[in-house]
């Protein structure tokens, strides 16, 4: 831990007596099957040209019929555990951020706990849509900072293809499946997660939702015929809200740390649309080189999005020990969040 860091530690401001929380391991998993824009041209009335220019997406991964969110989550978790040198017995808590659980209950986190053999761990799901991974990091780190737990596993995992309306070209070209995971622990030589913001606006819940399957609209022949068990989105409104919320959240965490964008080594934004990423990058005055993008390969993987991107950025050497990393997300709810991590 640098004794004279280039940033202010916002946790210290609150006289918080707790210890720091670092990400000591990351891992990700994407399914083998690739669905290209050319493949989608055969399914709905669309073109590679439209998808590429309007979104930046070229292909996405689709899980096998017998491959579920918990399977992908467990694979990503095993990789993160390997990097952190953590055994299943050491895990105290598992948080799975997802909007596509294996089933409404029990939680996917419980299924992951069993798959990993993490018998000691408590487990629950967290639902903040595409913002779920940052929500999960912020929740998980409380247990490390308060010394309640030593090792927390946070996973963002989605089988979005299971709730995709393959007749709706407005949505089915945008999303993909995958999982990313992080191990949270105290590391004495790092400030770790410096600060995070989480936000929500339930008045705009209708912009992006899956109306069927809950207590408001339980499954029925009618709900199935009305296609209520698929995701629906008002793309244009969601787009505008995403740019504004991500920009505001990112500025807020930098303000708290008293740094500007030049101090950030790598910005990892939610991977929903290249035009959203570029608009946020411009407002932050980030260079293209600072902003990590893997959207062209995976599309929008919702809660898994920044988790997969973080793992790839670390694996590629783009993020080194001591670097400052800015994560920024936006999703249904509406929800949003940002975090700054000293790696
Ligand atoms: O992860 C949560 C956050 N999610 C997001 O942030 C997504 C935010 N929204 C977006 O990324 C964009 O709004 C979209 C990519 C969904 C749509 O882009 P847009 O520039 O806002 O297009 P639009 O909705 O205004 O649609 C323009 C046209 C429409 O045709 P008309 O009505 O102008 O004749 C659409 O029907 O493009 C049409 N269109 C398509 N055409 C070919 C919509 N989807 C397609 C498609 N292929 N797949």
Image (tube, rainbow, N blue to C red):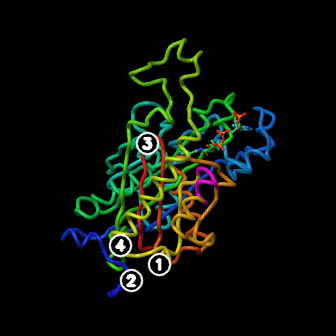
Q: Quadrant of the N terminus?
A: bottom left
Sequence-wise, which precedes: disc 3 or disc 1?
Answer: 1
Res 6 label = 2
Q: Which residue is mark 1?
A: 263
Sequence-wise, which precedes: disc 1 or disc 2?
Answer: 2
- 68 left or right of 259 in image: right
Q: Is mark 4 within 8 Å of ligand 1?
A: no
Compared to residue 224, the image places residue 87 above or below, namely below
**Gap in angstroms between the C-alphas marked 4 and 2:** 9 Å
Res 107 label = none
Characterize the local packing of mark 1: few (<14), some (14-19) or many (20 or more) Cα atoms within 10 angstroms: some
Q: Which residue is mark 4?
A: 257
Sequence-wise, which precedes: disc 3 or disc 2?
Answer: 2
Compared to residue 215, the image places residue 52 above or below, namely below
* x, y percent for residue 319: 54, 74
Sequence-wise, which precedes: disc 4 or disc 2?
Answer: 2
- 339 left or right of 228 in image: left
Element type at mark 1: helix
Characterize the local packing of mark 2: few (<14), some (14-19) or many (20 or more) Cα atoms within 10 angstroms: few
**Gap in angstroms between the C-alphas marked 1 and 4:** 10 Å
* x, y percent for residue 150: 30, 63
């Amino acid at each position: 831990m640098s004794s004279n860091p280039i940033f202010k530690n916002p946790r210290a401001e609150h006289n918080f007596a707790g210890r720091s929380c670092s990400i000591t391991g990351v891992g990700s998993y994407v399914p083998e099957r690739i669905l290209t824009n050319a493949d989608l041209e055969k399914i709905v009335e669309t073109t590679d040209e439209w998808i590429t220019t309007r979104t930046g997406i070229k292909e996405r991964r689709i899980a096998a019929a017998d491959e579920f969110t918990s399977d992908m989550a467990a694979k990503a978790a095993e990789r993160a555990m390997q990097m952190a040198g953590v055994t299943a017995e050491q895990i105290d808590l598992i948080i799975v951020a997802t909007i596509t659980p294996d089933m409404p209950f029990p939680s996917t986190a419980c299924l992951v706990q069993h798959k990993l053999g993490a018998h000691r761990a408590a487990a629950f799901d967290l639902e903040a849509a595409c913002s779920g991974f940052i929500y999960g990091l912020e929740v998980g780190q409380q247990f490390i900072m308060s010394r309640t737990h030593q090792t927390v596993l946070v996973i963002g995992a989605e089988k979005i293809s299971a709730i995709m309306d393959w007749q709706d070209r407005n949505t089915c070209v945008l999303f993909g499946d995958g999982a990313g995971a992080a191990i949270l622990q105290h590391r004495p030589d790092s400030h770790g997660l410096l600060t995070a913001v989480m936000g929500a606006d339930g008045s705009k819940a209708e912009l992006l939702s899956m109306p069927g399957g809950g207590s408001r609209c339980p499954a029925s022949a009618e709900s199935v015929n009305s296609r209520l068990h698929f995701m629906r989105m008002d793309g244009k409104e969601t787009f505008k809200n995403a740019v504004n919320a991500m920009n505001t959240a990112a500025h807020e965490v930098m303000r708290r740390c008293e740094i500007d964008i030049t101090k950030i080594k790598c910005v990892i934004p939610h991977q929903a649309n290249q035009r959203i990423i570029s608009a946020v990058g411009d407002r932050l005055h980030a260079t293209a080189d600072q902003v990590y993008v893997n959207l062209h390969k995976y599309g929008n993987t919702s809660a898994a999005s920044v988790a997969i991107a973080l793992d790839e950025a670390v694996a590629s050497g783009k993020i080194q020990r001591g670097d400052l990393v800015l994560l920024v997300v936006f999703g249904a709810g509406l929800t949003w969040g940002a975090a700054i991590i000293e790696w």
